[in-house]
Image: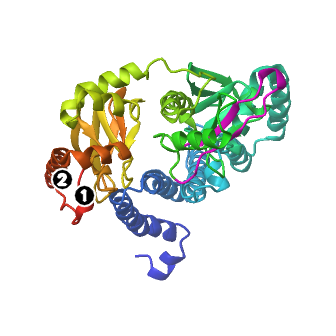
Amino acid sequence: MVPFGELLAEPWFWPVAIVIVGVPIVLLILTEIHSELETHGKAGGARLIRLLRNWLVPVGALLLLLSQTQFVSGGVDWVKVLATAFGFLVVLALLNSVNLFAFSRAAEGSWRRRLPKIFIDLGRALLIVIAVALLFSWVWGADIGGLFTALGIGSIVIGLALQNAIGPIAAGLFLLFERPFEVGDWLITSDGKGKVLEINWRATHFETNNGIRVVPNASLAGDSIVNLTRASSTWSSTVEVRFSTDDPPDEVIALLVSVASQLPQAHPDDAPAAIPAGKTADQGSGWYEASIPLIHPGMAWGAGGLFRRRLWYAARRAGLHLDGDTFDPFTTPERTREALARIAPRLYLEQHDVDSYAEQSRLLRYGEGEVVQHAHEVPDGVRFIVTGMARMSAAGPAGEIINIADFGRDDVLGLTSLTRQGIASRVVALEALTVLYIPVESLDRMVATRRELARDFGREVDTRRERTLEAFKKAGYVPPAGSRLIAY
């Protein structure tokens, strides 16, 4: 029997002991770490541990054993083969570790997060080629100087031959690295405005009003780009309109700002503005420029169209002359008198009363979605619906809209104009709406001599209050206390 002391002195003892005792322990520890990482959803770390457990440690153990025997079979030095494989696995493990800790966990906005994946893949491939060449030099004694020289010369020749094809790809790679915009951003380029849908090596895809536009990255790299999404202030859409020169500028500007502020696309934290536009002399005066801050740059087209449509109705209600139109053929005295005559019985009016009150009344028109009566605003008179539909609603505790009632032909709006109350409900036109407007001064005179009219209005106010309370309860909210909850 060999003495234990001499056994310890044998050169193969410790490598064999490490393989027999250490390798199972290391594999057990790596298995537990792998399970823990998979449980917590850390796929990158789990892949790295799996590489160590399934490949690096077993190949390293086998190399350690065979290195004690200098095993050669069939002219193949298997120790060198395993050393090459082990070195390659070490390189892969190191590269995966760098990728995991340097790039996968990079902070949002850092250069490591902005670095395109293609750059990381190309760098990894280059390092693998260099590492394999060095392994062959160290393990097999190969001369790799000629290989690197050939690769360098070959790269120059290929680059010169393919410079026109590689140029756009290189521009795309640098564009990906610089990251002046992301997918989802809205950009203005020399070709127009659009939303970024995709960015690849060769081109960027934009969504526009006329379809998908594909722009080569080489063109974008040399172009001036405005990133609307990353603007430090709210993006505004500019609309130019013309009024009659007889219209007071202050009234026109107030109307433009009012219409713009009520657009659904308007930014809630920024106010619209309007100024007289500096047009050339041959175009004449009367031009105005409205600036509309928008929630999103992509809303400019829809906001501009809706602004012009609503402005048409608002200008006629205000007695201003959009596009220089000085006559409205719709709101004639004959039509006004006809509308008042139809509802005269409800107002307890005689024939001679109709002629008198028709001169003080007006036909007003509203576009779909326009607010006929604002919340907390005291009505300036009553409005009887001639054509169209309107909806009364109120804001819930969290700002949500609670629908209360819909109104149609001959229904009346603005009942609280008699009591001079501004309440929580509002009325919006559901479609093109025409109303007969009777100012509060005329209404006061009617009520002074017709007590039945005041009684009817009071009953209708009570009815609408009950409908409002029911709507709140149906929505699951406790109605607020006080008289301000009554409806128009």
For the point 67% across and 24% down, the residue is 215
* Range of magenta residues: 269-294
Q: Dot 2: what SS?
A: helix
Note whether residue 409 is visible: no
Residue 109: assigned label: none
Give the residue displayed 78% in from the left and 29% down from the top. 279
216 in relation to 467, above or below: above
Q: Nearer the viewer, residue 35 or 239?
A: 239
Q: Which residue is mark 2?
A: 465
Image x and y of residue 172, in percent:
70, 33
Residue at the spot 15% in from the left edge and 49% down from the top edge:
455
The amino acid type found where label 2 is placed reads: Arg
Q: Which residue is outermost to the front?
A: 352
Between the C-alphas of marks 2 and 1, the distance is 7 Å
Packing grade of label 1 (10 A; few <14, some 14-19, many >=20) is some
Q: Nearer the viewer, residue 333 or 27?
A: 333
Residue 48: x and y in percent read 48, 54
Q: Quadrant of residue 366?
A: top left
Looking at the image, do the residues carrying marks 2 and 1 touch, with CB atoms under 8 Å apart? yes
Counting every numbered tag in the picture gives 2
Image quarter in which the N terminus is found = bottom left
Indicate whether 129 appears above or below 97.
Answer: above
Residue 312 in magenta stretch: no
- Does the image show residue 154? yes
Residue 6 pos. (x, y %):
51, 78
Amino acid tagged 1: Leu
First reached walking from the N terminus: tag 2 or tag 1:
2
What residue did someone put label 1 on?
485
Q: Secondary structure at mark 1?
A: helix
Mark 2 Cα shell of 10 Å, populated few (<14), some (14-19), many (≥20)? some
